[in-house]
Amino acid sequence: MAETDPREAAGATSWAVSAGAETEGTAHAHCPAWVRDLNIWTDEGLHRDPYPQYAELRSYPIGRSDRLGGYYVISRYDDVLAVLQDAVNFSNEHLFVPPTRDPSGRRIPIELDPPEHGLYKRMLAGFFSPQWTRRFEPTVRGIVRDLLAPHVGRSELEFMSSVAVPLPFRAMAVAFGLPPGDADLLRGWDDQMRSGTSDLDARKRASASVRVKLLGYFADLTAARRAEPIAPADGLVGMVDALVAARVGEDKRELELDEMANICVTMWNASLHTTANVLGNTMVHLAARPDLRDRLVADPSVIREALEELMRYESIVAQARLVRGEVTVGGRAMRPGDHVVTLTGSAGRDAAVYEDPDSIDFDRPVKKHLMFGAGLHRCIGSHVARMELRVALEEIHATFPHYRADPARPSRRHTGLERGTESLHLLLGAA
Amino acid sequence: MKVTVHADRCMGHAMCNAVAPEVYEIDDDGYNVMGTVEIEPDKEALARQGAAACPERAIEVTTD
């Protein structure tokens, strides 16, 4: 007899998308105007608190917006999982609505579909493996300690700019094997891309120009390393050097410079603000709940589970997919050329999977979540990210056991491609 | 009780091993290739927890 988790009404063996499509027109008879007019990247209500709207979206259960070129909103755990696991019917060619084209062409590996995707994924999965991650942990712990040390004895701390953002930049600079000091250069470009304007088109242009600069930077670096390989620091081969040494495919060929630059830029951008936002979000919730904080201070072994629960509570990523086949999701028939946006943040609050989903409970039996995605394109850096986040929380709770949110300066949050935190002011002294 | 890890659905999240290392082994890259195994009675609860931790629902628990 096959068993299912009692909280999973759909059943653990039901991997296929659900059957019974509604016909055109009837599926959205009850879908209100706000959904048809929803800009999933800029909606003010989502920025403030996306979860009430997500709950409403799950009830439709597939909403459709006419904005951004038109797209379906995938919001239930089962439906998000079904889309992410079906790389045949749901292509990664367009991860954004409306479709945009990266200066590199298609980003490797995230915007590739099988079979092309497999070649790169296998190579990169080996690089960011659990085994490699264990060897990298002491380096990350050292970086976290360096970031926290200047604040010991102080009364307050702006967490995002002091810890959450610099940590992944420094850690990934080592993981990639960048020359010392270049992390600051690349951080400067990143700041350029993100600051100065709230105009979405202007930000898109700034982002494209920084990506062109990054592609040039990594093309130069990989060419230099190919000409003159360097000895790895602490026995850890950096990703740039691993790419130079890699031989891929049946003919065991070297990677081209533009392939390596493309992979580096894709992986670099994917590893920074994602990690920073999850760390920031996690600290937003802990700083508001001294009872939860005290438990982690008293028993650091709970941190691993606490982190999973907080990533379930706020799964930050929203990605689009391009529909390739005739396919049905959540009872809604879709056609080739349609676009869908998957909301992992909504999946994490789905009452069909989690009991009392809007509460934070480190002891809940099912904490699985889709924050790192699922299927072929699940986050390749998940092992490294989990380690970075755990080590950061271990060091923070050991160093600042009394931290709490500054009531005079509330944290600034946003929702979009990622749910994140722009600022988090902490008070560090005993209350 | 048996657990079956569906290799085609395992994407290397490694969460089964994180939750229940005594039951679920992973390879160096984080993938579970153990197939179907019989679970000893004292490890059934752990095996269920590990299965529930898989975001892909790649682990099937069956009882006779």
Image: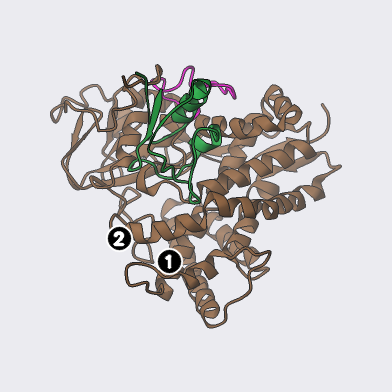
Q: Amino acid at mark 1?
A: Asn
Residue segment shown in magenta: A348-367
Say which of A148 and B63 sits in front. Answer: B63
The mark that comes first in sequence, 2 or 1, is 2
In which quadrant of the rendered view does residue A386 lie? Answer: top right
Label the brown chain with its letter. Answer: A
- As rendered, which of A251 and A277 lies closer to the eye? A251
Which residue is located at x 48 percent, y 21 percent? A357
In the rendered image, the vertical position of residue B31 relative to residue A348, given as above or below: below
Q: Residues within 10 Å of mark 2 (few under 14, many from 20)?
A: few
Compared to A350, does A16 lie above or below?
below
- The stretch drawn in magenta includes residue A44: no
Percent position of residue A182, x then y: 63, 68
Q: Which chain is green?
A: B
Q: Residues within 10 Å of mark 1 (few under 14, many from 20)?
A: many
Residue behind mark 2: A116
The quadrant the N terminus of chain A occupies is top left
Can residue B57 be seen here? The reply is: no
